[in-house]
Amino acid sequence: MATGFRVFLKRDLPPVDLVEAFKELPTANVADTMNRLCALSSEILLLSSPQDEIMSGVALTVKARPGDNLMIHKALNMAGPGDVVVVSNEGDRSHSLVGEIMVTYAKSKGVAGLIFDGPIRDIGAISEMDIPVYATSTTPGGPFKEGPGEINVPISCGGIAVEPGDIVLGDQDGVIIIPKKDAVAVLDAARKFKASDASKLAAAQNGTADRSWVDKTLAAKNCEIIDGLYGA
């Protein structure tokens, strides 16, 4: 097998209803139940205008050579409804990975979203498209189409490990990755967290928020509170 230049056609996928259930949850709520260790780098931003507030789908992973999109083209040929194409670019920022034509093709196939750990181009058109497109930046410099690369292998995107078939959740805050083996437990915890968060927001709005925990935490950590002026 040609390690480094290969395509796996199959993935271990979570149940569709499980993936759909995450569409009711903001990324922030889910991330907080995962010990805040699941969010892609803040460099990776939403650059399009999706109609749905929350993107939830399954990862179709691409390990691309820096500045090359041959394997991204192959991934788009394979992708379909419910798939989120997640692309590792080894941190390269010198070449765009896709443009308007490729994103339009992905949208025509019902792809749930596109995530690039690198730049894109044709931002004028893509910024108005209703398919979720996340990327680090834009550049007119186009990619090569040479390979090598891999599809449906474990990758690192935005500093987070992504396995083929993991659940990918995105909104205006950014993107998080939910390992498929943990998804049921995460969903249950996130639903409870969302309900608790709603009550905290209501208390903040009506002036009944209990902020005593701040001073209690500072005291427990031995923070010194001084009733006086600095340097006096």
Image: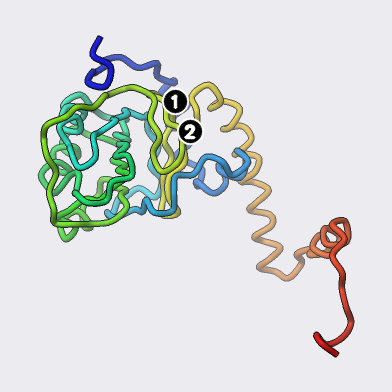
Mark 2 lies on a secondary structure that is helix
Which quarter of the rendered picture does the N terminus lie within?
Answer: top left
Measured as percent of width and height from the top left, residue 20 is found at: 43, 32
The residue tagged 1 is 17
Which quarter of the rendered picture does the C terminus lie within?
Answer: bottom right
Which residue, as the protein is rendered here, is positioned at the far top? Answer: 1
Query: Can residue 132 be seen from the camera position used here?
Result: no
**Residue 30 located left or right of residue 53:** right
Would you identify the image quadrant in which residue 59 lies? top left
Which residue shows up at 32% across the image and 37% down it?
A: 88
Mark 2 to mark 1: distance in Å?
6 Å
The residue tagged 2 is 21
Mark 1 lies on a secondary structure that is helix
Measured as percent of width and height from the top left, residue 70 is found at: 15, 32
| Callout 2–callout 1 Cβ contact below 8 Å | yes
Q: Amino acid at mark 1?
A: Asp
The image shows residue 168, relative to residue 91, as above or below, that is: above
Name the residue nearer the viewer: 4 or 87.
Answer: 4
Name the residue nearer the viewer: 196 or 72.
Answer: 72
Would you identify the image quadrant in which residue 30 lies? top right
Q: Which mark is residue 73?
A: none
Which residue shows up at 45% across the image and 32% down it?
A: 161
Q: Amino acid at mark 2?
A: Ala
